[in-house]
Amino acid sequence: MDRVTKLASQRPVVIFSMSSCCMCHTVMRLFRDLGVNPMVVELDEDPRGKEMEKALARLLGRNPAVPAVFIGSRLVGSTDKVMSLHLGGNLVPLLRNAGGLWV
């Protein structure tokens, strides 16, 4: 859990992902299309990835634990939460307030 918290606080937008996860790619594409440069942590490429995946599953209350999106060091959630925020017009203001989007 400490590693997840530490990584999540390093940049305004942090996405925990798996390189083979199509929903992870979708979320990353959304952020990049909005002009955000997120820090992406590929759990399947990190030596401590399994440990972080378990911690994220506990935080999210679900498995699979990816994508897990943090904005401003706060857990936003997975794809469904991110898309709900985006469709509701609340994602961009959240990104601006966290310093992840400047326009």
Image: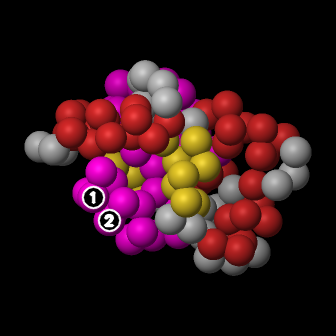
User: Would you identify the image quadrant in which residue 7 lies?
Assistant: bottom left
Residue 31 spot, x, y in % from top left: 61, 51
User: Residue at the location (39% across, 71% down)?
Assistant: 10
User: Residue at the location (50% across, 65% down)?
Assistant: 73
Q: Nearer the viewer, residue 9 or 25?
A: 9
- The residue singled out by tag 2 in the image is 6
Q: Which residues are magenta?
A: 1-30
Q: Compute the Cα span from label 1 to label 2.
A: 6 Å
- Circle on res. 65: none
How many marks overall?
Answer: 2
Q: Is residue 19 above or below residue 15?
A: above
Tag 1: amino acid: Asp
Q: Is residue 73 visible?
A: yes
- Circle on res. 2: 1
User: Residue at the location (84% across, 41% down)?
Assistant: 87
Residue 30 spot, x, y in % from top left: 64, 45
Decide if residue 75 is on the left or right side of residue 98: left
Decide if residue 24 is on the left or right side of residue 41: right
Query: Circle 1: is it few (<14), some (14-19), or many (20+) Cα within 10 Å?
Result: few
